[in-house]
Amino acid sequence: MNKKILILITIITVIIIITIIFFRQEKAEKKLANPKVQTVEPTPTPSPSPKTFQFDASTDLEKELDSVNPEVLDSDFNE
C-alpha cells in the first residue's frame, strides 16, 4: 500500500512540475513576441510640397489642361 501511495505522489509531482515548466515557457514566448517596451516612433519626414501654379485672367486654361499628361494623373490614382 505504501509503495502505491509513493508512486502516485511521485507521478502527481512530476505532472505538476511538467505543467509549471510548460506554462512558464509559454509565458516567456509571449513576452518575447510582445515585449512591454515603449515603442519608438520614427521621426516624421516632411512630405514634398506639391507643385503650385499661378493663373490669372489672361491664362488659357484649356491649353494648360491639354498640356497635362493624362497618364501621370491616372497613375496617381491606381493602387
Image (cartoon, rainbow, N blue to C red):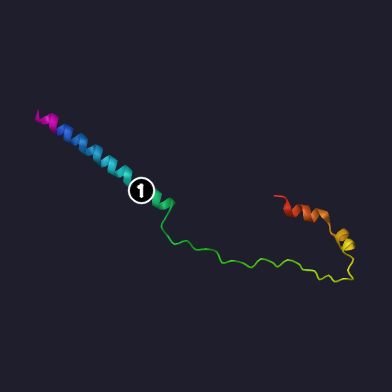
Please name the residue that numbered disc 1 is placed on. Answer: 27
Q: In which quadrant of the rendered view does residue 63 lie? A: bottom right
Residue at 28 percent of width and 40 percent of height: 18
Residue 13 on image: x %, y %: 21, 39
Q: Nearer the viewer, residue 36 or 10?
A: 36
Please report the residue visible at 55 percent of the width from the left and 64 percent of the height from the top.
Answer: 42
| Residue 73 counted in the magenta span | no
Query: In the image, what residue occupies the spot 30% across and 44% down?
Result: 21
* Foreground of the two, 52 or 33: 52
52, above or below 22, in the image: below
Image check: 40 left or right of 72?
Answer: left
The magenta stretch is 1-5
The magenta stretch spans residue 3 = yes
Residue found at the very far front of the displayed protein:
57
Residue 56 figure quarter: bottom right
Most prominent secondary structure in the magenta stretch?
A: helix
What residue appears at the point 14 percent right and 34 percent down from the top-left corner?
A: 6
Quarter-wise, where is residue 48 in the image?
Answer: bottom right
Percent x, y of residue 4: 14, 29
How busy is the neighbourhood of tag 1: few (under 14 within 10 Å), some, or many (20 plus)?
few
Numbered label tally:
1
Left or right of residue 69, residue 37 in this image: left
Above or below 6: residue 44? below
Amino acid type at circle 1 is Lys
Q: Secondary structure at mark 1?
A: helix
Task: Check the picture and name the quadrant holding the N terminus.
Answer: top left
| Image-based side of 59 in relation to 39, left or right | right
Question: Closer to the camera, 63 or 30?
Answer: 63
Q: Is residue 13 left or right of residue 43?
A: left
Which residue is the extreme one toward the left?
2
Question: How far from the left and from the top, in percent, is residue 79?
Answer: 69, 49
